[in-house]
Amino acid sequence: MVRADNPRQHRAVNDAEADYIEASHRAEDEAAQAAGSTSRRGLLPYLKFRSFWAMCFGWLGFNGVFYGLLTWGPLYLARPRAST
């Protein structure tokens, strides 16, 4: 299955939708240039969103558990246990 990154290459997108998407991207690029931004994407605009922070803390929690089990788990399993 080929993934289309360009809306015009996707079979479910008609010309009106593709025109709308391209116009929206052009408007974002022009607004970024007017604001003096050198790149279209920066980290600062995302810092105001609660969902961004939730994603960061969720990823931090996931990585803590994953790497904790990855490093501590084998040590725990390798240690002999006495049955009671």
Image: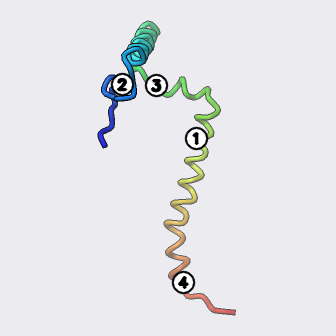
Dot 4 corresponds to which residue? 79
First reached walking from the N terminus: tag 3 or tag 4? 3
Q: Residues within 10 Å of mark 2 (few under 14, many from 20)?
A: some
- CA–CA distance between discs 2 and 4? 56 Å
- CA–CA distance between discs 2 and 3? 23 Å
Please report the residue visible at 41 percent of the width from the left and 20 percent of the height from the top: 40
Dot 2 corresponds to which residue? 7
Marking on residue 42: 3
Q: Marks 2 and 3: CB-CB under 8 Å? A: no
Dot 1 corresponds to which residue? 55
Marking on residue 44: none
Quadrant for the N terminus in the image: top left
Quick check: can you spot residue 29? no
First reached walking from the N terminus: tag 1 or tag 4? 1
Looking at the picture, which amino acid does disc 4 mark? Arg
Q: Marks 3 and 4: CB-CB under 8 Å? A: no
Looking at the picture, which amino acid does disc 1 mark? Met
- CA–CA distance between discs 3 and 4? 48 Å
